[in-house]
Amino acid sequence: MRLLCISDHFYDLCATRGTMIRLLQHDIECERAYKVHEGRRPNIVDRIKNGDIVFIINTPGSHDTRADEIAIRASAVGNKISYCTNLTSARACVTAVRCIKGKVAGLKTIQEYHGV
């Protein structure tokens, strides 16, 4: 499995339990973030509101996680935080960050790609 590599840009990663376990299995260090329904504070929404989170990848889960997904998305939008709901768009965002930071050559605008 090839995971998004954000950590080489000196960002600290945090993840809810299931994602954290998966990341740790691939030797990717991350900090635990609690889901809203877990009843522990600060939860992920608290951390978003506190300005601790700068980018969110939140892929759809089971029916049980729907309320948390809605709360996370609403907090992200309300706090103007970039938010992706699938790994394809997350990978594109990470690539863009790398380009902006000079790690990948060939950054072009959409207009340049389409000749507009």
Image (spheres, rainbow, N blue to C red):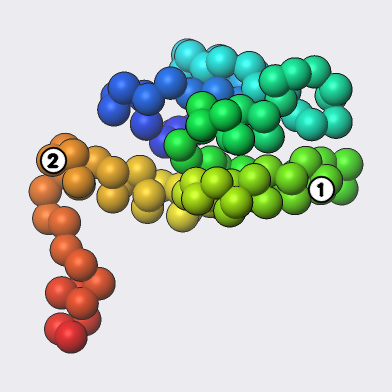
**Residue 87, percent from left and from top:** 51, 48
Q: Residues within 10 Å of mark 1 (few under 14, many from 20)?
A: few
**Residue 103, percent from left and from top:** 16, 38
Give the quadrant of residue 57: top right
Asked whether, in this view, residue 30 is left or right of residue 71, the answer is left
From the viewer's side, name the closer residue of 21 and 54. 54
Disc 1 secondary structure class: helix
Asked whether, in this view, residue 98 is left or right of residue 68, the answer is left
Q: In this picture, is 113 found above or below 18?
A: below
Q: Residue at x 67, y 51 (%)?
A: 74
Residue 22 in view of the camera: no
Asked whether, in this view, residue 64 is left or right of residue 53, the answer is right
Give the quadrant of residue 20: top right
Q: Residues within 10 Å of mark 2 (few under 14, many from 20)?
A: few
Give the quadrant of residue 31: top right
Q: What residue sits right under mark 1 in the picture?
A: 66
If you read the primary sequence from the N terminus, does the residue marked by circle 1 or circle 2 appear first? 1
Q: Residue at x 18, y 39 (%)?
A: 101
Q: How many marks?
A: 2
Disc 2 secondary structure class: loop
Question: Which amino acid does the dot numbered 1 rest on?
Answer: Arg
Q: Residue at x 64, y 45 (%)?
A: 75
**Residue 65, percent from left and from top:** 81, 41
Whether tag 1 and tag 2 are in contact, CB under 8 A, the answer is no
Question: Residue 102 bears which disc, if any?
Answer: 2
**Residue 69, percent from left and from top:** 73, 46
Question: Which amino acid does the dot numbered 2 rest on?
Answer: Gly
Q: Residue at x 75, y 29 (%)?
A: 35
